[in-house]
Amino acid sequence: MELVVSLAVGVMAAAGVWLLLRPRTFQVLIGLALLSYAVNLFIFSVGSLSLGKAPVVHAGVAADLAHYTDPLPQALVLTAIVIGFATTALFLVVLLALRGLAGGDHVDGREGEP
């Protein structure tokens, strides 16, 4: 399980960085989204990967990570998803305004030059 999650985080982070370096603003937007998903998955996996364990402490059971899932990474990831959605929406509005004003979506403004 840990190997699959580690590979998923690595592949998403690598693809996100690769797309961040592309010349089009839409590709940069997708790269930012992939990178944020990779970071969210990493934060989620740091909180111990456990299946079928409750995040709430019950009476009579020891309060350690052997019996429970850490709820803090879940809360952080949920907050990061909401912030990432708002940032993506704002970036899309700026992208549409840029495309309308400049006539293209190239990052440095030079469409035909290498």
Image (cartoon, rainbow, N blue to C red):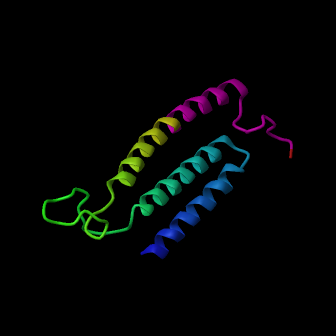
Residue 78 vertical position relative to residue 87 in the rendered view, above or below? below
Can you tell which quarter of the image residue 45 is in? bottom left
Q: Residue 62 lies in magenta, yes or no?
A: no
Q: Quadrant of residue 73?
A: bottom left
Residue ID at (61%, 50%): 31
**Which segment did they paint magenta?**
88-113
Q: Where's residue 70, x and y in %?
A: 33, 58
Locate the N terminus and report the quarter of the image it occupies: bottom left
Quick check: is 101 in the magenta stretch? yes
Given the current orientation, which residue lies at the most extreme left position? 60
x, y percentage for residue 10? 57, 65
Give the percent coordinates (x, y) of residue 61: 17, 66
Is residue 78 toward the left or the right of residue 36 in the image?
Answer: left
Instruction: Say above or below: 64 vs 25.
Output: below
Looking at the image, which residue is at 72% across and 27% down? Answer: 102
Q: Residue furthest top?
A: 101
Give coordinates of residue 78: x percent, y percent.
38, 47
Left or right of residue 62, residue 7 in this image: right
Residue reaching furthest right? 113
